[in-house]
Image: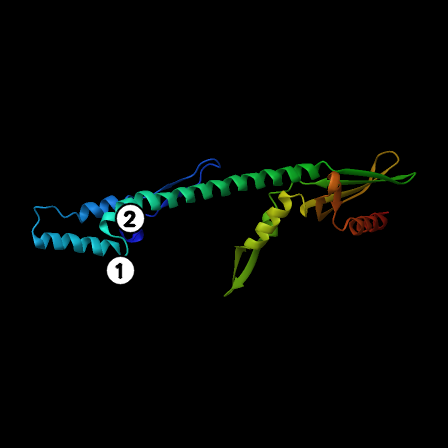
């Protein structure tokens, strides 16, 4: 009924995490005014007004709401529905804001990570997690590409997107760059490399790096090749 008589779409404006609004046309007043039957009308005019109401309110050939109940329904039941919808939008925006804040905190926390260990009396190993490129590079983890009729199109994998932000906001499987650096006894850099990986914040704030041993081994091989 609204789609047929509303003249416009219901406008949903989620502009704030504390309050959102929905704007809609008051079709009840419009339909009632157009179909009002006054005492001075003759039978033809009254029949015409009744037909107008039936045409405007018909759904699959049936009129489901009587004229006397329309105004009450529109301003109570329908109004309650709109209020609940606004509340849900506000809750979603609030939850989204909390997720974004948690994502930012996860990247900031892991970006502070540094690890140093002496390999021997001439060599020192340094590990650092670099999160400067994130979250700007996060779309690479949920944007896919498919080919159709010789053209390539991008698409968003919604499941990957939700899983990524859910994990990162809770401090698990956060995409990072692990910088591996070897320095000499004089502090000079002997070899340096970066490796994309995932990291998590465990119990008591302990940082866990996925494939840490394998990536360090790879960096050692690069160091040996360069010596």
- Residue at the bottom extreme of this rendering: 149
- The numbered disc on residue 62 is 1
Q: Is residue 152 left or right of residue 73?
A: right
x 47%, y 40%: residue: 90
Q: Residues within 10 Å of mark 2 (few under 14, many from 20)?
A: some
Left/right placement of residue 39 relative to residue 115 reads: left
- Asked whether the beta carbons under mark 1 and mark 2 sit within 8 Å of each other, the answer is no
Residue at coordinates 23% horizontally, 54% vertically from top-left? Answer: 56
Q: Nearer the viewer, residue 115 or 172?
A: 172
Q: Which mark is residue 44?
A: none
- Classify 45 as above or below 128: below
Residue of label 2: 6
CA separation, marks 1 and 2? 19 Å
Q: Which of the 4 quarters of the picture holds residue 156?
A: bottom right
Of residues 117 and 172, the one drawn nearer to the viewer in this rendering:
172
- Relative vertical location of residue 187 with respect to residue 82 in this rendering, above or below: above
Residue closest to the eye, 60 or 66: 66
């Amino acid at each position: 009924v609204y789609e047929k008589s509303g003249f416009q779409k219901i406008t949903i404006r989620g502009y704030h995490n504390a309050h959102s609004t929905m704007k809609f046309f008051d079709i009840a007043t419009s339909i009632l005014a157009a179909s009002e039957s006054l005492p001075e009308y003759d039978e033809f005019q009254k029949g015409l007004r009744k037909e107008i109401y039936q045409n405007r309110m018909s759904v699959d050939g049936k009129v489901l709401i009587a004229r006397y109940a329309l105004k009450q329904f529109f301003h109570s039941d329908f109004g309650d529905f709109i209020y609940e919808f606004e509340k849900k939008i506000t809750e979603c925006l609030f939850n989204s804001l909390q997720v974004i804040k948690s994502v930012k905190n996860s990247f900031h926390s892991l970006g502070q990570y540094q690890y140093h260990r002496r390999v021997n009396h001439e060599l020192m190993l340094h590990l650092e997690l670099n999160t400067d490129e994130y979250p700007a590079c996060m779309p690479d983890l949920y944007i896919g590409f498919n080919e159709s009729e010789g053209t390539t199109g991008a698409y968003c994998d919604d499941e990957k997107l939700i899983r990524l932000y859910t994990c990162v906001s809770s401090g698990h499987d956060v995409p990072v760059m692990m910088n591996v650096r070897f320095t000499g006894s004089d502090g000079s850099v002997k070899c340096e490399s970066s490796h994309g990986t995932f990291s998590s914040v465990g119990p008591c704030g302990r940082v866990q790096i996925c494939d840490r041993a394998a990536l360090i081994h790879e960096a050692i091989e690069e160091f040996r090749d360069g010596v």
